[in-house]
Image (cartoon, rainbow, N blue to C red):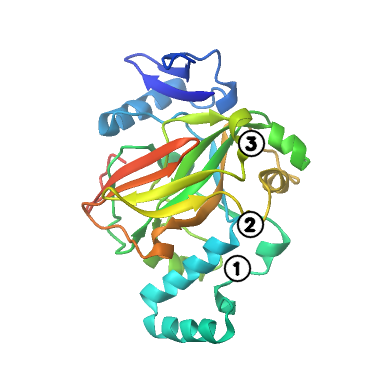
Amino acid sequence: MKLRRICTDSMLELQSLAPDGSWVPAPDQAALGGAIFDRDWELATARRHLQMSGYVLPFQPASFRDFMLYERHAIDAARGLVRRFHPGQSRAAEWAEKLTRRSFPLFKPNALFYRQPVYYMSNHLSFVPSGVPVAIPPYSSALDFELELGFVLKAPLYDASPQAALEAIGAFVVVNDFSARDVQRAEMATGLGPQKSKHFASSMSVIAVTADEILPCIDELSGSVSINGTTVSTVFSRGMQWSIGEVLAHASQGEQLYPGELFATGTLPGGSGMETGHWLRPGDRLSLAIDQIGEVTHSISGTMEQSL
């Protein structure tokens, strides 16, 4: 079932897509975590998003944990990062890869990636819906995007099994994790993870699709990245290092997880500019799509809007 919210003068209304193609009131908000935030605050936030884009978020996430589940993305992204910021080292690594016919060892993820799911916590309050114009932060000259698969809890979890974790997922969305790569390089070196490089803005599709429609084909999803109307990459969901159930079970170990919390897979292979060499510039029109769910589109400007 596809879900969306609309904003009226006095309320936010959740709707579902009927078989005849019309949008009708949804029976409840359970699939998206239910009511979490102060009603007036959430309505004011939705009105601001509506003014900027004509859309509102399908739900306001209670938190955001972003995993890294794809080895292929990690390797190709590391290669692209070195290519942009360290061209001399990039040429040496390229020579080594041609000679050995293997990925350069330093491009591979940290050993912990292969032992357990890894993630970071980002700013759940900086999410905007598709359509909101996004500016390059004033402290960055290397804005990038990340096409990801997001999923929200409809039920609490604690020390859950992978199967129980799957049953707690309410719906899936398209997530875009905007990233200031030049800033991220220095922040990652501290060992504390990304900060200003990620927290300024993230986005999600205005449509959410319930878990019963997505989980049966979780390894068969497809999507694309388009910039200024030209498709620059095609992506697929297959190849996760850990299953969705395993990553949620890991996150719930000794930790209470709540309805409304948002998680993401990390970038689908080929779903970032760092991998393909297509970095964002002022005036660009970005479109990130997962065919079975929806899309996220943004125009990119050169000055940060305080309204975000």
Can residue 66 be seen?
Answer: yes
Query: Residue 115's image quarter?
Result: bottom right
Q: Is residue 68 above or below residue 44?
A: below
Query: Residue 32's image quarter?
Result: top right
Could you tell me residue 120's position as x and y percent? 56, 54
Q: For the residues marked 3 and 2, what is the alpha-carbon distance in whole angstroms? A: 21 Å
Q: Which mark is residue 109?
A: 1
Quadrant in which the C terminus is drawn: top left
Q: Is residue 98 left or right of residue 111?
A: left
Front one among 181 and 71 = 71
Could you tell me residue 171's position as x and y percent? 57, 31
The type of residue carrying mark 3 is Leu
Front one among 129 and 207 = 207
Per the image, the residue denoted by label 3 is 215
Q: For the residues marked 1 and 2, what is the alpha-carbon distance in whole angstroms? A: 10 Å
Per the image, the residue denoted by label 2 is 118
> Mark 1 vs mark 2: which is more N-terminal?
1
Front one among 275 and 260 = 275
Nearer mark to the viewer, of 1 and 2: 1
Could you tell me residue 34's position as x and y percent? 56, 23
| Secondary element type, mark 2 | loop
| Secondary element type, mark 3 | helix
> Mark 1 vs mark 3: which is more N-terminal?
1
Q: Residue at x 28, y 39 (%)?
A: 307
Nearer mark to the viewer, of 3 and 2: 3
